[in-house]
Each structure stands twice: as C-alpha cells, then as structure tokens.
Amino acid sequence: MTRLVEVFKRNPYVVAEVLHRASGVCGSCLKPAPFTRKKDGAPYLEVHHKKQLAHGGEDTVENAIAVCPNCHRQLHYGGQSV
C-alpha cells in the first residue's frame, strides 16, 4: 500500500511571532500555558492555523493563533472553532 502525504513548508518566523504575541496565554481558553518547555523554560503553546493550510489557508501571523495543547486537540477533533 502506498500513501501520498502533502507536506507544507512552514515559516519559522510566523511561529515565533505568534508565540511572542501570545505572551504565554492560550488564545482559545485564555488561560496561561499549562507548562514550560524543557529546553528553554518558555511557556508551551502550539500554533494553530485558523484556516488549515490543507484547505488553502496561508502560513501568516494573521491566520494563526497560539493555543494550549488541550484547546489545539479540541479545535481539530472536538468541533470547537476560533
């Protein structure tokens, strides 16, 4: 069985800017990040694209939001939207 997977090139500057603007607070539940990253002690948040790249969304700061891991899963699998 062969499976094709489309990979999108991400801009690391978009990720860095979105995380910086979030100031350690989830953009969905508005709570502080649940823990810090082991490597540098920064608040752990994930960058979520409001309109998915696979659906034509752009890799821009305007199309992205920093969210905690729980909210990120809920956005993808639980029907919640931003």
Image (cartoon, rainbow, N blue to C red):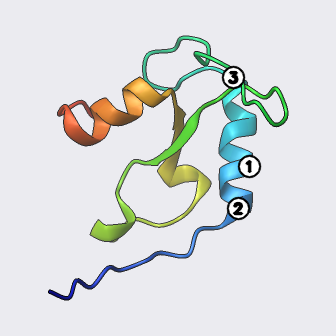
Marks 1 & 2, CB-CB < 8 Å contact: yes
Element marked by disc 1: helix
Residue 12 is marked as 2
Of the 4 image quadrants, the one containing the C terminus is top left
Can the viewer see residue 82 in this picture?
no
Question: How busy is the neighbourhood of tag 2: few (under 14 within 10 Å), some, or many (20 plus)?
Answer: few
Question: How busy is the neighbourhood of tag 3: few (under 14 within 10 Å), some, or many (20 plus)?
Answer: many
Element marked by disc 2: helix
Three-letter residue code for mark 3 = Gly
Residue drawn at x 66%, y 29% is 22
Residue drawn at x 17%, y 34% is 79
Three-letter residue code for mark 2 = Pro
Does 70 appear above or below 81? above
Question: How busy is the neighbourhood of tag 1: few (under 14 within 10 Å), some, or many (20 plus)?
Answer: few
Rounded to the nearest whole Å, what is the CA distance between mark 2 and mark 3? 18 Å
Left or right for 10, reference 20: left
Q: Which residue is mark 3?
A: 24
Rounded to the nearest whole Å, what is the CA distance between mark 3 and mark 1? 12 Å
Residue drawn at x 61%, y 19% is 33
Q: Which residue is mark 1?
A: 16
Residue most extreme to the top:
31
Left or right for 76, reference 79: right
Upstream in the sequence, badge 3 or badge 1? 1
Upstream in the sequence, badge 2 or badge 3? 2
Viewer-side residue, 7 vs 67? 7
Of the 4 image quadrants, the one containing the N terminus is bottom left
Does 76 appear above or below 80? below
Residue most extreme to the front:
1
Left or right for 30, reference 50: right
User: Picture coordinates of residue 38 (x, y %)?
Assistant: 76, 30
